[in-house]
Amino acid sequence: MPENVGMILIVEDEKMVADSLAQILCSKGYDARVVYSAEAALQLVEQWFPDLAILDVMLPKMNGIDLAVLLKERFESCHILLFSGQPTVEALVKKAKSEGHEFEIMAKPVHPTVMLEAISKRLSTNGAQHCQA
């Protein structure tokens, strides 16, 4: 179980994927919250400040990279982990890089062990320090 429990936001429009990931994270002691759209994520972060956001790149209406940019503008110290099962996200990544944003994208499906290692690595960089607005 993690020493410093992190608050993790999961934004994924595939309900089964999102709920399964949240269940895994909760079983490891993380405080994981799930929403199924970027719009719902923006509403949630009005009241709850995640240490890390796991975002699907291909979301309806607003994509995960645009959401990541908004979250980083609001919560600079929050970590972002993007994941996608679509090979066509390269243009979105290039656009974000051209605007000065660097994001790592993991390919779906992601094995739970790999995801947990990535989360642990990001949260242990400077500890699970809860982000403030």
Image: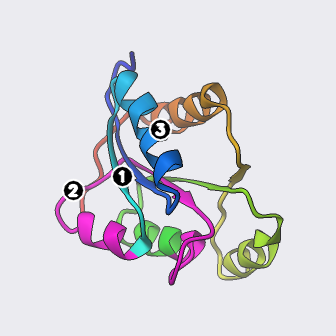
Marked residue nearer the N-terminal end (3 or 2): 3
Q: Quadrant of the C terminus?
A: bottom left
Q: Residue at x 65, y 60 (%)?
A: 103
- Marks 1/2: CA–CA distance: 12 Å
- Compared with residue 117, is residue 15 higher up or lower down, i.e. above or below? below
Instruction: Identify which residue, 65 or 27, lies in the foreground.
Output: 27
- Give amino acid for label 2: Trp
Instruction: Identify which residue, 80 or 73, lies in the foreground.
Output: 80
- Quadrant of residue 93 within the rendered picture: bottom right
Q: Is residue 63 magenta?
A: yes
Which residue does the numbered mark 2 point to in the structure image?
A: 48
Tell me where residue 91 appears, x and y as whole percent: 79, 79
- Judging from the image, what secondary structure is the residue with disc 3 in? helix
Q: Residue at x 70, y 44 (%)?
A: 109
Q: Is residue 60 magenta?
A: yes
| Magenta region, residue range | 39-66
Which residue does the numbered mark 3 point to in the structure image?
A: 20
- Marks 1/3: CA–CA distance: 10 Å
- Judging from the image, what secondary structure is the residue with disc 2 in? loop
Tell me where residue 52 appears, x and y as whole percent: 43, 48
- Compared with residue 54, is residue 36 higher up or lower down, i.e. above or below? below
Select label 1 or label 2 by which is in front: 1
Q: Residue at x 82, y 64 (%)?
A: 87
Marked residue nearer the N-terminal end (1 or 2): 1
Check residue 34 in the rendering and tell me which mark sits there, or answer none: 1
Q: Residues within 10 Å of mark 1 (few under 14, many from 20)?
A: many
Instruction: Identify which residue, 119 or 73, lies in the foreground.
Output: 119
